[in-house]
Image: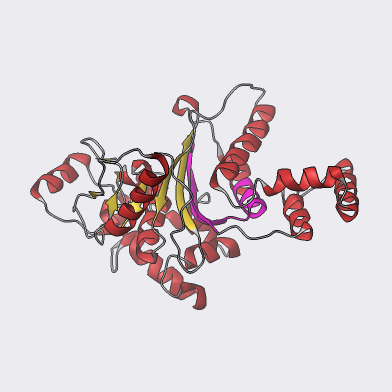
């Protein structure tokens, strides 16, 4: 389902999305250098588009990003120029000259300036332009430096609209940050450079700001307090380090589902949970029903749909999803 941009954070008029995209044929094309370039571009383009990254993970053949999309507000010419410059952190001489020409044209409010302003404002405060620009700019860099041509990405990105409650966001963020653990790359996500949690632990202020939104009252507390609360979701309170070194066997988890038994949340998050990437909308039943109603009113479609509860293999806090999935929902 194609989501309408619907407010989910009543206080700020913001929406939160989990986005994921893969390389063509799932090829493991992204080495450490490529991941570093993509990491920088994610932050730069989020700043340019006026979006906030809550967390992210980049692996060798795909990446995840949890994005907060604020309600659109007027953007001054001065701010527009600042954001535009962010895309060129080390401008060449001609780019510096171009900045000066743009500024001059904006001061005159010329026809060229109005066209430039309109083009750039169209990129602000929306999910699709952000993802399009990230994929385009990275593809240009990758193809140029690897002497290749053609598409780099397999498909249009997937997105899941996530309820803006701290508990729901924290669960989704932990699923994203635990990707390198599920892939067997590290025992602890803090040791994986290309994820939001590791950047926050290393002191990156925007990464810390993003994670602070995941803990109730985190924006007004010290980082150590935010970190401790989030890490409890990642690994579970009092979890022994040795537990981090293994993932849950898919067959064992399937038995838990059938027996209606429950596992600690941090253990389930170390498995691939398709509802987090394929569920279309994720949140409380009331939230999913609200989004479904808005979609039905807008399109006249899915009139027979209803929120689907996420299987209770752990204490999800009564999470529901819009898109029902086939068997084998939980995969390693």
The answer to whether any part of residue 11 appears in the image is: yes
Q: Which residues are magenta?
A: 41-70
Is residue 305 depicted above or below 284 in this figure?
above
Question: x and y percent of residue 175 in the render?
Answer: 37, 52
Is residue 175 depicted above or below 23 in this figure?
below
Residue found at the very far bottom of the displayed protein: 221
Question: x and y percent of residue 172 in the render?
Answer: 38, 54
Choose between 64 and 49: the one closer to the eye: 49
Residue 146 among those drawn in magenta: no
Q: Quadrant of the N terminus?
A: top left
Question: x and y percent of residue 12 in the render?
Answer: 51, 66
Choose between 58 and 122: the one closer to the eye: 122
Residue found at the very far left of the displayed protein: 259
Q: Quadrant of the C terminus?
A: top left
Q: Residue at x 38, y 56 (%)?
A: 174
Q: Is residue 268 left or right of residue 150?
A: left
The answer to whether any part of residue 188 appears in the image is: no
Choose between 49 and 145: the one closer to the eye: 49
Q: Quadrant of residue 83?
A: bottom right
Q: Is residue 119 left or right of residue 28?
A: right
Q: Residue at x 46, y 46 (%)?
A: 4
Residue 59 among those drawn in magenta: yes
Q: Quadrant of residue 146?
A: top right
Numbered marks: total: 0
Q: Is residue 285 left or right of residue 211?
A: left
């Amino acid at each position: 389902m194609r989501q309408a941009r619907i407010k989910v954070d009543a206080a700020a008029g913001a929406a939160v999305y989990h986005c994921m995209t893969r390389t063509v044929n799932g090829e493991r094309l992204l080495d450490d250098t490529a991941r570093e370039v993509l990491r920088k571009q994610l932050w730069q383009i989020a700043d340019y588009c006026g979006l906030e990254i809550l967390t992210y993970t980049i692996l060798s053949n795909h990446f995840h990003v949890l994005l907060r999309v604020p309600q659109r507000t007027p953007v001054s010419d001065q701010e527009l120029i600042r954001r535009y410059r962010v895309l060129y952190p080390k401008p060449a001489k001609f780019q510096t000259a171009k900045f000066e020409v743009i500024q001059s044209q904006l001061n005159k409010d010329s026809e060229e300036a109005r066209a430039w302003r309109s083009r750039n404002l169209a990129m602000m405060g929306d999910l699709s332009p952000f993802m399009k620009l990230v994929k385009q700019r990275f593809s240009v860099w990758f193809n140029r430096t690897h002497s290749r041509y053609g598409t780099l990405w397999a498909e249009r990105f997937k997105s899941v609209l996530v309820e803006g409650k701290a508990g729901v966001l924290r669960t989704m963020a932990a699923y994203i940050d635990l990707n390198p653990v599920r892939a067997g790359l590290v025992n602890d996500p803090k040791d994986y450079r290309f994820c939001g949690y590791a950047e926050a632990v290393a002191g990156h202020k925007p990464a810390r700001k993003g994670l602070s939104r995941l803990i109730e009252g985190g924006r007004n507390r010290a980082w150590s307090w935010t970190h401790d609360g989030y890490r409890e979701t990642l690994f579970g309170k009092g979890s022994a380090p040795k537990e981090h070194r293994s993932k849950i066997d898919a067959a064992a988890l399937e038995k838990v589902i059938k027996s209606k038994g429950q596992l600690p949340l941090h253990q389930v998050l170390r498995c691939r949970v398709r509802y987090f990437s394929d569920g279309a909308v994720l949140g409380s039943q009331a939230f999913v029903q609200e989004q479904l109603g808005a979609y039905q009113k807008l399109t006249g479609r899915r009139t027979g749909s209803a929120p689907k509860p996420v299987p209770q293999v752990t204490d999800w806090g009564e999470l529901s999803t819009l898109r029902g999935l086939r068997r084998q929902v939980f995969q390693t």
